Amino acid sequence: MLSTLEGKVAKLEGSVGNMKESYEVAKEHTLDRDSGRDELKKLTERDGVLEAMIMTLKEEIEAMVTTLNEQIDELKGELVVFRTVVGKGVLGATRKHNMDVSKPKEFKRMRSTRDVDNFLWGME
């Protein structure tokens, strides 16, 4: 009976050893699962922060686009005014160039080359 009991104890010890190994494996999986949960929680928090940042940037961009559209509309209005002014010739009028040209003396059939030369030099 003692040998039978020793055999059963050996089997129990083997089973307990297997159970300890299974327990350790299960414990590691539980720790891995818990750390996975922690990582998931951190990622979820980061996701929320990133989403808030994206929403803020989106609002800022929409405000900038609105401002730019208003400025474009204002510039288009000014362009219409300028085109109207130019079309009416207010700014498109050319300046008259008044040149001071001396008039030669009345021609009396004879003219000296010096008079002609002085006249030409006076025009410059």
Image (tube, rainbow, N blue to C red):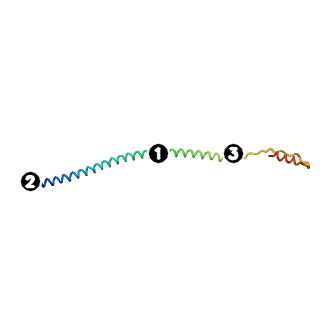
Question: Distance between the Cα atoms at labels 3 and 1?
Answer: 45 Å
Mark 3 residue crowding within 10 angstroms, few (<14) / some (14–19) / many (20+): few
**Residue 67 screen position, x and y as percent:** 53, 44
**Residue 48 screen position, x and y as percent:** 39, 46
Q: Nearer the viewer, residue 40 or 31?
A: 31
**Residue 74 screen position, x and y as percent:** 58, 44
Question: Distance between the Cα atoms at labels 1 and 2?
Answer: 81 Å
- The numbered mark at residue 91 is 3
Question: Mark 1 or mark 2, which has the lower sequence index?
Answer: 2
**Amino acid beneath label 1:** Leu
Q: Which residue is mark 1?
A: 57
Question: Mark 2 or mark 3, which has the lower sequence index?
Answer: 2
- The numbered mark at residue 44 is none
**Amino acid beneath label 3:** Leu
Answer with left or right where residue 82 lies relative to residue 35.
right
- The numbered mark at residue 2 is 2
